[in-house]
Structures are given as structure tokens and as C-alpha cells.
Amino acid sequence: MLSALFATLLLLTPAPDAYHERAAKEFQAQAGLSGKSAAELDYGQIVEAQFRALPLGVFELRFPHADLEKRSAELLKCAAALLDAQQLLLDWTRDLGQDQKPVREDLKLLRKWIGGLKEGQLARLAPEDKLPLAAGVAESQARLADAFGKGALLGTTRAQAERVRLIVTPSRKRFVEFVSFAGWLDETNRGLFWVTGLWQWTSCFVRSDCVIALEYSAAGGTPEGYELGSLMNEQSPTTMEQQLVQLSLNALLERFLGQRVPQALIQGLSMNLVIEQFGIVNTRVDGDTRARQTQDREVFVRGGNSEGGELGKNFADSRWRELYGADHFLKILKQTQKEGADLVKLPAQKTLSFALRDDKGAAPKSFLAPFYCPEKPPEVPAGYAGDFDEFQRSYKSAFLHYLQTAAGGPGKKSSEGFARWVSQLAAEGGDKDLLSITQAVYGVPLSDAQASKDSLEGRFLQWLPKAREK
């Protein structure tokens, strides 16, 4: 009897991935494409027809026509945040001495235009209507797209302009259905998208497009209820914009730096720009997201490449996120470094040791630097993986903050060195990699087997206990 009942329940329970086909068909129906086969449809034409284009410097933001009536306020917030982020990137490379006045004037005009747009204007636009452009905006945008796409944001130049297209969906429903439809459309790569965890993702790449959701999946949700979401700005008023900026910058920096540097460094740069822009980084892009299974752990120098999508909200904030990175995580790093010093006996290891905890928040264990030495990758027991991921997230933010403010010396020397470092990492061509560029700019290696004072990481570890917190 029990066996028969169990068999019946199995038949009634949907397969783990069954919702993808339903979601794909829903998008197809809403797009007016029902009855069409995948062979009859073109991905580029569908994006063009279903998503409003908003050019924003190096970015092209795409937003669903169907969501403009009720959620155009989010589009305007996203647009303003992306323009402000590009302004800050210009600030990072200002000390290179290049003439930034023309692009800054174009960026200022574009920002003023976005600030003057009203929700009602966008809500009333039909798919075939053009955006109401102010005088000179189209010309300014064309110049910015060319200059920024060729590297002006990062103080370098390249032959062909890059362009980063962002498909931003304000709802969980639209995100899951579009990505599921993209998987249905591309049978060869369907397995990248039709995975059980898609309903929790907040971003992924579809072809070369970065697709970003502006809602988390609902707490206690299920794959079959993928439509349910929760607003990102419930915890802080700018979390949505922070998440968007960090993911967008990851996509941008991957284009310019990806051949030379690991994803971990790119994420650290994006995190620090978010902190500069919003004062905190309350995002769920990296660190301990717990349920995420689609990305291998990667540290500054070595590790796996990411595949699949990014999961969203980790509902239990850790001690690492107490200040949301407002101090570039200096307070918590100092604390764990001090606790780590008590766990080792050798004086030479005192500044190298950090006390991390297991998944129960107990059993402190010493983890010794270097963390950025390619010959000595850290070994992390499974029970400490969560705390280590949060530690790495904090460590890279603080380390990059050190490079930008202290590594090159007093005054503008540090910011100038940081600008040269970023610019050379983004330069097109050549055979220089992260390690050789770091050596050339700073005169010492990124790290060494002892994290000694003759390496950048060793100097950072000696600087950390004395660093001023905000």
C-alpha cells in the first residue's frame, strides 16, 4: 500500500526542471510568437522587439516594453546608477594625466537628460516609439560609446570599441521566462540554462548579453512558483542599484581585463566602486551565497572560471557583512587577524594568520597568508568554506583599497600607481600578465611564498593593523 502511494506521489511530483518549458512557452506567448519553431526565430530580432534600448555610455541597457507602464521608475534609477558608475571609473584613472574633459562633458549632458526624464513619458511609449531625446544627447552618446568602448574609462585605447549590452528584467517572472526561452531557442546550450537553480539566479549571460534581475527569488519559494520575488531594496534603499552596478561592471571589466586577471580581482574592483558610489556594498554577487553551485572558488591568482548564473539573497548575514563594507572590511579583517595571531606560536606568523570559523560559527582555525601566491593556493576544509569565501570577499576589497590609497606612498602617488596598474591591465595586446604588470608598476611581486615585506601582499598585511577605519 505504501509502495503504491509512494509511486503515485512520484508521478504527481513535477520533474526538477519541468518549469523551464512552461516558462519558455509563457515568454513565447507574451511575445506573440506562439506556434513558431526555434528554427523560425532569431534571438537578436526578439531582443530588439521585446526590450526598449537605452544607450548609456559603454552600456546599452535593455528593458522590457511590457514593464515600462508599471516599473519605469526602476529603469530610471538603473540608468542614473550606470552613468554615475562610469563617472567614478573616470575618476580612478584621472591621475594618468589624459584629457578627460570632452568625455566628462558628454557624460554630464547624458546624466542631465536621464535626470529630466519622467516615469510617465516612458510609460506612455509604444514599442515603435523613439525615446524623447534632448538636444545634443544622441551625438554625446555616440561619442561616449566610441571613447569608452575603446578604453577611455580605464585610461587605455584599443582598435575596436567594446559595447556591453545589459538585459534588465524588473521581475522574477520576466527573468526566468526570458532565460528559459533563450534555452529553448538554443538547443545546443540548453543545459546551461535549464537547470534546477535558475529560479533563484539573479544574473547570467545569454550569448554575449548580461541578463540581470532586479528582484530576488521569494523566501521559501519553489521552482514551480518562480514568478514570486522580493524587492532588493527592502534591506537598504539602494541595494537594487548596487547589485546592478556590480554585475554590470563585472561584465565590463571582464571585456577589458579578463584575459589577464581572474574573476576574483574583477569582482573586487567592482565591489570597491560600488562602495565609493553608494557608501556600502550590500550585494549578493560573491562571497558565501550558500546555495550557489554554479561557480568554482577562485582567489586572486588561480581558480576556476565561472559558469552558469549567480544566485541571489543569502538570508543570514554573517559577521563579515555587519558594516556592509563601508570601511572596506577593515574592522572585521583586523579582528580576525588579531584572533589569528593568538592561534599561532611563531612570531613571524602573527600578521599572516586569520582566524576563520566553521559553519556553526565555532572552532576558530588559523589560515595563513599568502593568499595571492600562485605557487601556494590555500587549502580550505569543507566546513570552513563559507567563512573563507566571505573572508576572501573582504580581503580583496581591503587589498585593492590599500593599493589605491597607500601602496604607492603618500599623497597622489598611490592613486597614480593604481591608475597605471589598472590601465596596463586593460591595455590591448602584449604578453604581459597580472604578475609581470604588478612587478613593473610597484617594483615588488604581488606576493611570495612567505607573504614577506618584499611583496605587495606582505606589505598589506603589515599595513592592515594600523589602517584607519572610516
Image (cartoon, helix red, strand yellow):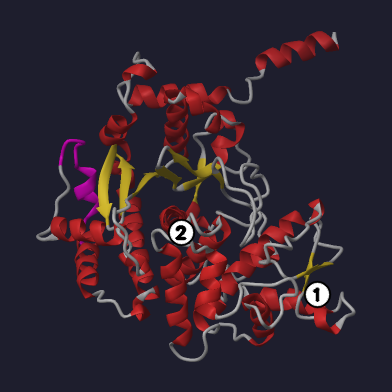
Q: Position of residue 276 (x, y in %)?
A: 45, 72
Placement of the C terminus among the 4 image quadrants: bottom right
User: Label 2: which residue?
Assistant: 257
- Rendered position, 314 above or below 3: below
Q: Mark 2 is on which residue type?
A: Leu
Placement of the N terminus among the 4 image quadrants: top right
- Rendered position, 111 above or below 240: below
Sequence-earlier tag: 2 or 1: 2
Q: Is residue 282 visible?
A: no
User: In this orientation, which residue lies closer to the viewer: 67 or 32?
Assistant: 32
Q: Position of residue 165 (x, y in %)?
A: 34, 47
- Rendered position, 459 above or below 196: below
Please give the name of the residue rendered at 43% of the width and 27% of the height, measured from the top-left corner: 181
Please give the name of the residue rendered at 45% of the width and 55% of the height, measured from the top-left corner: 240
User: In this orientation, which residue lies closer to the viewer: 127 or 421?
Assistant: 421
Q: Is residue 379 visible?
A: yes
Please give the name of the residue rendered at 65% of the width and 84% of the height, measured from the top-left corner: 463
Which stretch is magenta? 116-129
Please give the name of the residue rendered at 49% of the width and 24% of the height, measured from the top-left corner: 188
Q: Is-magenta flag for residue 62?
A: no
Q: Secondary structure at mark 1?
A: helix
Q: Position of residue 147 (x, y in %)?
A: 25, 62
User: Label 1: which residue?
Assistant: 340
